[in-house]
C-alpha cells in the first residue's frame, strides 16, 4: 500500500511539473520563428507553426502535449528541424550521465570517508583539517575550479587532455570539478550524523559490552549515520547531471547541457520542455527508489507506514 501510494504521488508530481513547464513556456514572450520572418514567406511560417501545433488554441496544445508525453514522444526540435527532442536527449545524455555518475561516486566515496574520519577525531586536528577541506570545496564553484584544473593538470603538467571527449582521461578533470562541492556537502552531512550516532546510548551500550571500536563504527555507527546521506543521493545525482551544463561548456563535452543552453538562446521550446521534464523525471524516480530502499537499509522503517 505504501509503495502504491508513493508511486501515484510520483506520477502526480511528474504531471504537475509537466503542466507548469508547459504554462511557463507559453508565458515567454516572442515567436520561436521570429528570426525566419524576414526570409521565409508567411505561408511557410504558418506551416511551420502548424507542425509544432502553435496554430491551435492553448487548451488543444496542452492536450496534445500531454498525449505525446504519455507516448514518450517529446516532439521535433525547432532549431534542429531534422531531429526529434528524443534523439537529442538520447545522444547527449550518455556523456552527461557518465560525468554525473563519476562525480557522484567521487563525492560519496571521499565525502563519506572524510566525514567518518572527521567524526571519529571530533574536535581534533584531523577534524579541523577535514572541515577546512570541506569549506574550501563548498566555497569554490565548479566553473572556477575547472579552469584551475585545466591550467595545472593539462597545460602546466600535461597529465590530462585540455578538453573534448573521448577516452577515460577526458572525464577525470570535469568529474573532479563537478564533484568538489557535493563531496564537501556529503562530508559535512556524514560528520554531523556520525557524531550524533556515536553519542547515542546504544553505542555506549555496545562499548560497555566489549565490542571493538571498529565493530562499533562499522556495525552501528556507519549503518545508522549513513541514512541522512542516502536520502540526499537522489537530489545530489540529479543536481550533478544538471550541473554538468557549465562544465560541459568549459571542457567542450558533447552532453545534453550544450543542447539545453543552445535551446534557451534559440527559443527551441520543445528542447527546453523536453530536457526539463526529462531531468525532473530522473529526480522524481530517483527519490521514489531511494524512499523505497530505506526499508532495505533500516528494517525499523516500515513500508506500510502511513507517514510520508
Image: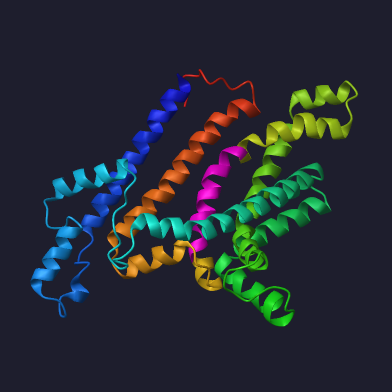
Residue shown at 51%/59% (left/top)?
Answer: 243
Q: Nearer the viewer, residue 52 or 2?
A: 52
Residue shown at 37%/49% (left/top)?
Answer: 277
Return the x and y of residue 106 as percentages of the image width and height. 67, 54
Q: Is residue 196 magenta?
A: no
Residue shown at 24%/47% (left/top)?
Answer: 65
Residue shown at 56%/72% (left/top)?
Answer: 251
Let me know if residue 198 appears in the view.
no
Q: Which residues are magenta?
A: 230-245
Classify 298 as above or below 87: above
Which is the main secondary structure of the residues drawn in magenta?
A: helix
Classify 63 as above or below 152: above
Viewport quadrant of the N terminus: top left
Name the residue furthest left. Answer: 43
Name the residue furthest front. Answer: 82
Let me know if residue 142 appears in the view.
yes
Classify 161 as above or below 110: below
Q: Is residue 238 magenta?
A: yes
Q: Does residue 51 appear left or right of residue 79 in this picture? A: left
Amino acid at each position: 500500500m505504501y509503495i502504491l501510494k508513493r508511486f501515484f504521488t510520483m506520477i502526480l508530481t511528474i504531471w504537475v511539473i509537466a503542466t507548469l513547464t508547459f504554462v511557463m513556456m507559453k508565458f515567454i514572450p516572442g515567436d520561436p520563428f521570429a528570426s525566419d520572418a524576414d526570409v521565409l514567406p508567411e505561408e511557410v511560417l504558418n506551416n511551420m507553426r502548424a507542425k509544432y501545433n502553435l496554430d491551435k488554441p492553448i487548451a488543444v496544445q496542452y492536450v496534445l502535449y500531454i498525449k505525446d508525453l504519455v507516448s514518450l514522444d517529446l516532439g521535433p526540435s525547432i532549431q534542429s528541424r531534422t531531429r526529434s527532442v528524443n534523439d537529442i536527449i538520447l545522444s547527449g545524455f550518455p556523456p552527461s550521465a557518465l560525468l554525473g555518475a563519476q562525480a557522484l561516486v567521487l563525492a560519496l566515496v571521499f565525502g563519506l570517508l572524510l566525514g567518518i574520519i572527521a567524526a571519529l577525531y571530533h574536535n581534533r586536528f584531523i577534524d579541523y583539517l577535514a572541515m577546512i577541506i570541506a569549506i574550501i570545496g563548498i566555497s569554490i564553484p565548479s566553473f572556477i575550479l575547472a579552469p584551475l584544473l585545466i591550467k595545472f593538470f593539462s597545460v602546466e603538467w600535461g597529465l590530462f587532455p585540455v578538453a573534448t571527449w573521448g577516452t577515460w582521461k577526458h572525464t577525470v578533470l570535469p568529474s573532479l570539478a563537478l564533484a568538489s562541492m557535493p563531496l564537501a556537502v556529503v562530508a559535512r552531512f556524514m560528520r554531523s550524523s556520525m557524531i550524533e550516532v556515536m553519542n547515542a546510548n546504544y553505542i555506549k551500550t555496545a562499548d560497555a559490552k566489549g565490542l571493538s571500536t571498529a565493530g562499533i563504527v562499522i556495525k552501528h555507527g556507519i549503518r545508522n549515520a549513513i541514512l541522512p546521506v542516502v536520502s540526499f543521493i537522489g537530489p545530489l545525482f540529479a543536481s550533478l547531471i544538471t550541473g554538468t551544463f557549465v562544465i560541459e561548456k568549459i571542457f567542450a563535452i558533447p552532453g545534453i547541457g550544450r543542447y539545453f543552453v543552445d535551446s534557451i538562446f534559440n527559443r527551441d521550446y520543445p528542447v527546453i520542455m523536453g530536457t526539463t521534464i526529462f531531468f525532473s523525471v530522473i529526480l522524481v524516480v530517483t527519490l521514489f527508489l531511494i524512499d523505497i530502499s530505506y526499508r532495505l537499509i533500516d528494517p525499523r522503517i516500515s513500508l506500510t507506514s502511513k507517514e510520508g
